[in-house]
Amino acid sequence: MGKNLVIIGGGAGGASTAAEAKRNDPSLNVTILEKGNFVSFASCPTPYYIGNLITDEKKLVARTPERFGKDGIDVQLHAEVMNINLRENIVETKDNRRFSYDFLVMGSGVSAFVPAIPGTDLPGVYVLKNLDDAIRIKKWLHENNARRVVIIGGGFIGLEMCEALHAANIATTIIHKDSLPANRWDPELSSIMVEEMKNHGVEFIAGAEASSIEKGTGTSLVVTTDKGRYDGDMVLLAVGVRPNTALAKSIGLNIGKTGAIAVNFAQETSLKNVYAVGDCCESWNRVSRSWVNIPLGDIANKQGRVAGRNIGGNPLTFDGIVGAQSFRLFNLECAATGIAEKEAAAAGYSPVSNITWGSAMAPSLGMRKIGLKLIADKSSGRLLGAQAVGVAGAVGRINALSVALWTELDLDQIGYLDLAYAPPFSAVWDIIHNAAQALRREI
């Protein structure tokens, strides 16, 4: 009889672990405990589901419980884990189900941060963390014939949601505590994002702190800030997430400086035969040379495969990340990778940077504006980070620069990279070449 693998959480990391472990060791008895209604769901596309760009929620589920069952993996939905008994190797759920394990995987994900202001418990106030949240939000918008939504927070979720809601003919107001959205990007680049939002009718309220949410007329709500009051048929709280580590702490797992579960390169925690994957745990940043917590589905999937391989007896390491991220904002591609100046200085580098503006195609064919920021180490010339915003080509260039970060290329090497050239896609000297050579000259 095979050993028992119990996975807490059926998101990207947990589901990936289950599939990979069973693939590598078919004798394993694999059980996924998920407190929600779905497993193996994609959270990142949920704004587009809410905005009707994706009409069928089933398209956001990679594998159903029934499909897992055909592969010999038992999925238990509505199974909220309340206790882990280390002495008996037993996991206990809220409804008193008990599951014994030889291997335990923490895939508990994150919780949306809810600001400590009055009114966050009112009907029509939501967070967006998973597919269950998205279904509830979409239902509320439809049933209440919503025409305006107030979003508190100008990060990834807030920006993606304003575009998705615009596609559904719903106006948005974004209330953001800082002067510009998407804090990771340089102000010169993020100011382009503000222009793009305004061009599409999005009201962006900068430097504003929400102090309360109150019930308005009918089903409407009112958000009070230090810069005024803003009405909406729904309020979305998009001010960040926190790793779910209560269970991990209850059994004494080490928690890293980020507040997420500490792991090694095999996804092992501080307790034998206990692993952690996905948004609830840390990843090694190859550029800053530090452990970080970046809750993204692609990272969770990779960590899950690594954990599954190791549990299944086919060792593999997860060698880290460089911090590549991207999102779309109406007609803009926004992407970044690596670290910025502040992080670089904290990591012991001497950062220098520049911003280069150009076209994503040969000028003879027209102008497709793109801005590219590079950050490098002054003493070595090594690339440390990059940010890009443009109507085309931003994500592709950041992907190329992510490979440069992974392989620790310096500016001289990047300035002469062999990149695919054709007039519809770049000039003879790509903006990557121009930016790298310009920063090299500054150094």
Image: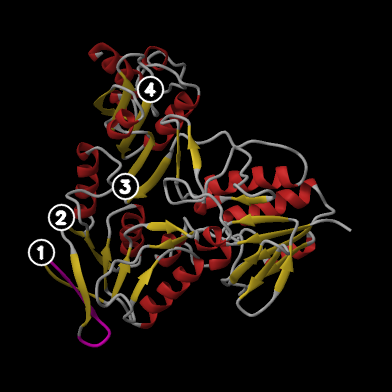
Q: Which of 131 and 293 is in front in this view?
A: 293
Position of 200 with respect to 139 (left or right) is: left
Q: What residue type is labelled 1?
A: Lys
Question: Under tag 4, what secondary structure?
Answer: strand
Instruction: State which tag comes first along the sequence, 1 or 2.
Output: 2
Q: Which numbered disc, 4 or 2, marks the residue that appears first in the sequence? A: 2
Q: Which numbered disc flags the more N-terminal residue, 3 or 1?
A: 1
Q: Does the magenta stretch include residue 222?
A: yes
Furthest residue toward right: 1
- Decide: is 199 above or below 52: above
The three-letter amino acid code for the residue at tag 4 is Leu
Q: Mark 1 points at which residue?
A: 227
Mark 2 vs 3, N-terminal side? 2
Dot in front, 3 or 4:
4
Pointers 2 and 3 in contact (C-beta within 8 Å): no
Q: In which quarter of the image is the N terminus?
A: bottom right
The quadrant in which residue 425 appears is top left
Identify whether 281 is placed above or below 239. above
Q: Is mark 2 on a helix, strand or loop?
A: loop
Q: Are marks 1 and 2 in contact (CB under 8 Å)?
A: yes
Q: In which quarter of the image is residue 185?
A: top left
Question: Is residue 276 found inside the magenta-colored segment of the image?
Answer: no
Q: How far is the residue under mark 2 from the one under mark 3? A: 25 Å
Q: Mark 3 points at which residue?
A: 331
Furthest toward the bottom, the residue is: 218
Q: Which residues are drawn in magenta?
A: 217-227
Alpha carbon distance from label 3 to label 4:
28 Å
In the displayed structure image, the side of residue 238 where residue 204 appears, left or right: left
